[in-house]
Image (tube, helix red, strand yellow):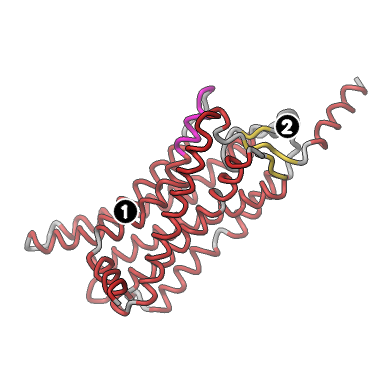
Amino acid sequence: MNHQEKSSQDNLTEIIEFVLLGFADMAHLQWFLFGLFLIIYIIILMSNGTIFLITKMVSALQSPMYFFLANFSFLEICYVSTILPRMLINIGTHKRRISLVACATQMCFFLLFGGTECLLLAVMAYDRYVAICNPLHYSLVMNRGVCIQLVTGSWTIGIPVMIGRTYQIFSLPFCGSEQINHYFCDIPPVLKLACGDTFVNEMLVYTFAVLFGMVPFLLILGSYSKIISIILKLPSATSQAKAFSTCLSHLMVVVLFFGSAIIAYLRTNSRHSEGTDKMLSLFYTILTPMFNPMIYSLRNKDVIMALRKLLCK
């Protein structure tokens, strides 16, 4: 019995790094995946970087809506950069090991930027709500100071929560397998490697998913229900179409991001869920940040005109 307890204790202290399996089961597609994700990363950096720059440089894009869009584009770059560079290194070098500290750091920044994105999308919905439902007081309600406070709150409110959550997870003892069946250090696959009862931590996953996912999502739905009811009361079809066009881009982004993220974190576990988890994660970690600039720019005449002016100089 003493020997078994000693062996168990040894196993608890042996694991000082993990192995991110990623897409190791697709060995014949490794270089294809490397090229694909590299192209996607370049597209994300260039497209979001372009939107960030033009909203700062073009005087016509100095309204609160574009202030939030600039912050959102910068956030997307930070969000994706916590995952894709490491994933590209793992695929390109086949060295998938990651230390506990690096894994904890990646998880912390991923949670922080992900939580910030949820809150910032809710702030952008509030901006559209004020613009359409209370247009006469828009400039007063959404003044520069309020916009800065909303953005600052979105970036900072989750910092102590996410640091504390990460510390709690990595304070758990890890034993047995060191292989994380994912392409980054996400909470559910890391928790699967923890020893002992993880029920409390699993419940906290659902709690944080509700607080930083469902609550902002419901606030956004509430804002858009009010917005749609106001738009439908507008006298002309032209006015309705113009009002809808200013909201549709944001609504598409919300559906893409929240839809995949909420399904991934709130759905029940099953034996065959790991592959599905990775596919769902691709939507809210990589594909959505790639499509967001296209959705905003292709449907926004002001952004297209500003981009043309800069290119023609």
Amino acid type indicated by mark 1: Gly
Residue 183, percent from left and from top: 56, 39
Q: Which residue is mark 2?
A: 195
Give the answer, above or below, for where 98 lies relative to 146: above
* Nearer the observer, 140 or 263: 263
> Taking 293 as reference, is 13 left or right?
right
Q: Quadrant of residue 3?
A: top right
Give the answer, above or below, for where 122 lies relative to 263: below
Amino acid type indicated by mark 2: Cys
Residue 197, percent from left and from top: 69, 31
Q: Residue at x 33, y 77 (%)?
A: 58
Q: Residue at x 33, y 68 (%)?
A: 65
Residue reaching furthest left? 236
Q: Which residue is mark 1?
A: 222
Q: CA distance from mark 2 to mark 1?
A: 41 Å
Q: Which mark is residue 266?
A: none
Magenta region: 271-280
> Magenta part mainly helix, strand or loop?
helix
Give the answer, above or below, for where 291 lies relative to 157: above
Give the answer, above or below, for where 166 lies relative to 140: above
Q: Quadrant of the C terminus?
A: bottom left
